[in-house]
Amino acid sequence: MTTDYGKLTWEEVRDADKDRVVILNVSATEDHGRHMPLDTDTVLGMAVANGVAERMPDEVFVMPPVAYGFNEHHKDFPGVIWIQPETLIAFVTDITKSLAHHGFRRMLLLNSHGSNHSVLDLAARKTVIETGAICVSASYWNLCADRINEHRKSETGGIAHACEFEAAIYMHLHPDLVDLGKATPQVVHDPGSRFFNLDLARGGGKAMLMRWWSEVSPDGTMGDPTVADAGTGAKFLQAAIEETAALVREIRALPILQRKDHH
Ligand SMILES: [Zn+2]
């Protein structure tokens, strides 16, 4: 049986193992510097999801992605398509409620765009409340942050957006679609700050401020794509796939618990 949800027939859905983990990638369509395409977050997120499916073909299904996200703060850059967070929560929970209606009990909202993180956390919580299914949210770089740091060349601040991490993986997948000749480093991390950390692989900040993107980045980049290479990208992607597969295994093993109303 295929792991590609869109290629299933309705009878295959009816007869499928409902403890398979259904993976939904939610990404964004937005500027990624002068050197990378608008679809970066979707290409990378789906590479992780499909890589997991290749490793565990009997344990997951991969949904068609939601290729738009919460990114109105990017709209000074041409090409950005933004979705209001309330809309995105409602849209994603309509997908998860549909899956629960068909009997699926285990879902993973796999995020590949920074600002979706808290939106998908809420969507997953709403899914649990409204369906009783297990619904987990995770941003894929968080799952493999330690291993990113083993392989990276950039200093803290080098991995944020259209950065060493994203450029390297995209170069590994489609070398013809990344033009490092147009890339410039934009490291805005302030090592003197105790609370703001603008590096995705180094823990994130204790406090959060998301400014208008055009206030902090002249070309849409945040981080250092100039040190990216395809070989490191292959290692980043392998780490992301392996760690996401490990999470899927844990989700498969989670017990289905029963509520108890203590009124
Ligand atoms: Zn991105």
Image (cartoon, rainbow, N blue to C red):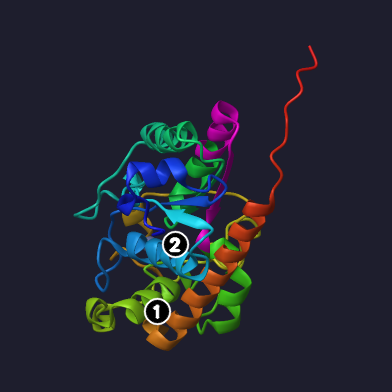
**Identity of the residue drawn at 20% across and 54% down:** 79
C-alpha span from label 2 to label 1: 18 Å
Give how far across and how far down residue 202 sits, in percent: 60, 67
Query: Label 2's element?
Result: helix
> Ligand 1 closer than 8 Å to the CB at disc 1?
no
Give the camera-side residue of 28 and 163. Answer: 28
Q: What label does residue 199 carry, if any?
A: none
Q: How many marks?
A: 2
Please tell me whether residue 247 is drawn above or below residue 178 in the rendered image: above
Using the image as rendered, state which of residue 190 and residue 37 is in the foreground.
Answer: 37
Quarter assignment of residue 176: bottom left
Secondary element at image label 1: helix
Q: For residue 245, say whether it is visible.
A: yes
The residue labelled by disc 1 is 168
For the record, the magenta segment spans 123-140
The location of residue 137, given as percent across then percent down, is 55, 48
User: Does the segment drawn in magenta span residue 132?
Assistant: yes
**In front: label 2 or label 1:** 2
Q: Is residue 94 left or right of residue 157?
A: left
In the current view of this chain or complex, which residue is farthest to the right?
Answer: 262
Q: Are marks 2 and 1 in contact (CB under 8 Å)?
A: no
Residue shown at the point (69%, 48%) measured from the top left: 254
Which residue position is annotated with label 2?
A: 49
Q: Is residue 124 magenta?
A: yes
Residue kind at label 1, given as amino acid type:
Ala
Taking the spot 37% from the left edge, 42% from the top edge, the residue there is 11
Mark 2 Cβ inside 8 Å of ligand 1: no
- Counting other residues with Cα less than 10 Å from the Cα at mark 2, is it few (<14), some (14-19), or many (20 or more)? many
